[in-house]
Amino acid sequence: MTDQLPAAGGMVRGDGAGPARGGGMLVHSDGIEISPVADGYVVYHPGRDRVHHLNPTAALVLELCTGGNTATDIGAALRAVFGPGKPVDSQIGPCIDQLLSEGLIQHISNVSTHCTQKPSGKGLTRG
C-alpha cells in the first residue's frame, strides 16, 4: 500500500494536543528503509509491510528526526526555510502526527538503535 503524507511546515503550537507535542526528541523508527526519489522520499516500513511516499517537505521533516530535535525544533527549522506565516505553519503538527501514527518516526524514549547509511547507497535504514 502507498500513502501520500501531507506537506509539513513551520510552527508547532504549545497547546499540548496531539502526539507531536508530547514526547521530546524524535527519531526514525527501527527498520525503515528510506529511498530518495525526484519528488521526496519513498519509505518502506517492513514491520507493517507498507510503502509511503513523502513529498519534499515531509521528507525534510523525516530528515530532521535525528534524535536531537523536538517537534518544536523541527517547526523552527522549517520556519527558517519557508518563512513564518506561510501555510506550512499549520501543517507541521499534523505531518509529525501522521509520521508517528504510520510508525516512521518515534519519540527517542522508544528507540534502542541509531540510523545508519546503507553501504549500497540505496538509502537510510534503521536496525
Image: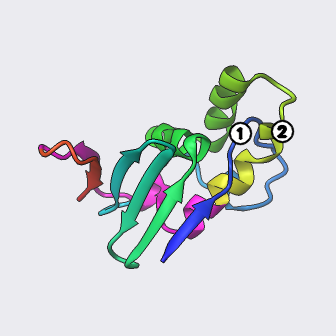
Q: Is residue 95 above or below residue 67?
A: below
Q: Amino acid at mark 1?
A: Gly
Query: Magenta stretch?
Result: 98-119
For label 2, the crowd category at 10 Å Cα-Cα, with few meaning under 14, some 14 to 19 and many 20 or more, is some
User: Which quarter of the figure has residue 47?
Assistant: bottom left
For the residue pair 66 and 23, the one nearer the viewer reads as 66
Question: In this image, 39 relative to 29: left or right?
Answer: right
Q: Is residue 32 above or below residue 66?
A: below
Q: Is residue 87 above or below residue 42?
A: above
Residue 87's label in the rendered image is: 2
Question: In this image, 16 relative to 37: left or right?
Answer: right
Q: Is residue 80 magenta?
A: no
Residue placed furthest toward the front: 38
Quarter of the rendering occupied by the C terminus: bottom left
In this orientation, does residue 18 appear? Answer: yes
**C-beta proximity under 8 Å, tags 1 and 2:** yes
Question: In this image, 3 relative to 127: left or right?
Answer: right
Q: Is residue 50 above or below residue 39?
A: below
For label 1, the crowd category at 10 Å Cα-Cα, with few meaning under 14, some 14 to 19 and many 20 or more, is many
Quickly name the residue at label 1: 9
Q: Is residue 105 magenta?
A: yes
Q: Mark 1 vs mark 2: which is more N-terminal? A: 1
For the residue pair 36 and 23, the one nearer the viewer reads as 36
Q: CA distance from mark 1 to mark 2?
A: 7 Å
In this orientation, does residue 22 appear? Answer: no
In the rendered image, residue 67, in percent from the top left (x then y), is placed at: 43, 42
Q: Residue at x 48, y 78 (%)?
A: 1
Q: Residue at x 38, y 44 (%)?
A: 36
